[in-house]
Image: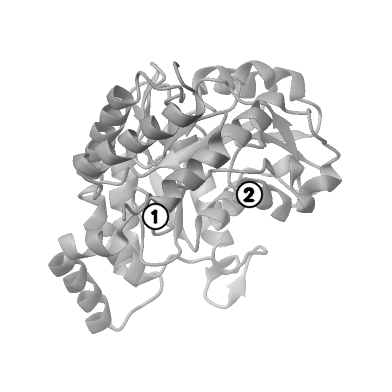
Amino acid sequence: MIPFSDLKLQYLSIKDEIDASIQRVLTSGWFILGQEVQAFEEEFASYVGASYAVGVGSGTEALHLALLACGAGPGDEVITVSHTAVATVAAIELTGARPVFVDIDPRSYTMDASQVEGKIGPATRVILPVHLYGQTADMDPILAIARQHGVKVVEDAAQAHGAEYRGRKAGSVGDAGCFSFYPTKNLGAFGDGGLVVTSDHSTAERLRLLRQYGWKDRYVSSTKGLNSRLDELQAAILRVKLGLLDEWNDARRKHAALYDALLQETAVTTPVHMGYGKHCYHIYAIRSEYRDELREFLRERGVGVLVHYPVPVHLQDAYRDLGLGEGALPLTEQVAAEVLTLPVAPEVTEGQIGQVCDLILEFQSTKAPGR
């Protein structure tokens, strides 16, 4: 078996440090918004290169609260992509705003910046690019359009911990950047967790109010908020893992380079590393016209492969009310039909990657002889 990821193996590699961090919290007797959260917020903000960080309950809530803090609400529009986790779009709708989709760039699979201008309208409040699979969207043209029209840019960096755009860490480029600490992320907690970074003081203050009932003083709400707090246990665990993030990302890049080399002569399409940034390979996504057959072939032989994401958001039943049918976003729909993600986590070995590539070559010999 070659698992897609092995969180138990990761834990065992840092067991003493993790156990000590948990014990520190248990001994303190303080479990919500205490010293561990404050320390992690400061450390993560410093790592990303932002002035402030606000820990919240999940990546979805990070997006939701960041959008609210940037003024999105009923009657507004948020421009984003459909080739993403449904959480991106769910967060927009939680604010009462309406998602407006643009298609993706065929190389990066992220927002096609050239299409954004045509979607800007009087109701546009925020542009929400998604840094998909560990690679950032092309942010400069997106930011230029946002400045021209006076709208905010919120980065969905849930898959981009440690990725870079022109020397800046993902999340620090727009008005706010949103992260998920779901366990399988490059920086993962032992449960749900999220965080928003920003360099704008008023946005940070607004986020702190929104995450805890709008309280400036305990039990007294100065604005309407909700309950979305990163807990002390998760923060303590994440502080340990943050110190290893660059090392783990380097391992992912090394694995990706090996895949690139071994799959060079195959018919699958390997990821394009865009020259403007530094990929952190949360996911190593290939494309194949025989995707479903290749997936079953690999699964039957013990390889943990997944599809991120099989159905674009605009074609899912829950979002049919947006009025977009098949053909509305052709590149998004094509990629969704062909993409397949291979194991690339730091715990994967070079030998396992070689086995995966050998199996892909074996499959190809039966499906596409001579190619």
| Count of numbered circles in the view | 2
Q: Nearer the viewer, residue 166 or 160?
A: 160
Residue at screen point 42% across, 25% down: 270
Q: Mark 2 points at which residue?
A: 86
Neighbor class of circle 1 (other Cα within 10 Å; few <14, some 14-19, many 20+) is: some
Residue 101 shown left or right of residue 285 in the figure: right
Asked if labels 1 and 2 touch by Cβ distance under 8 angstroms, the answer is no
Residue 287 in view in this figure: yes
- Is 191 rendered above or below residue 49? below
Q: Which of 267 and 59 is in front in this view?
A: 267
Q: Residue furthest left?
A: 16
Question: Where residue 20 sits: x, y (%)?
Answer: 17, 72
- Is 10 rendered above or below residue 299? below
User: Which residue type does callout 1 highlight?
Assistant: Thr
Question: Where residue 69 sits: x, y (%)?
Answer: 60, 48
Q: Mark 1 points at which residue?
A: 184
Question: Where residue 261 sits: x, y (%)?
Answer: 28, 23
Residue at screen point 30% across, 58% down: 6
* Quadrant the C terminus occupies: top left
Residue at screen point 45% across, 53% down: 195
| Mark 2 / mark 1, whichever is N-terminal | 2
- Is 99 rendered above or below residue 135? below
Neighbor class of circle 2 (other Cα within 10 Å; few <14, some 14-19, many 20+) is: some
Tell me how far mark 2 sits from mark 1, CA to CA.
Answer: 17 Å
User: Which residue type does callout 2 highlight?
Assistant: Val
Q: Tag 2, which secondary structure?
A: helix
Q: Tag 1, which secondary structure?
A: loop
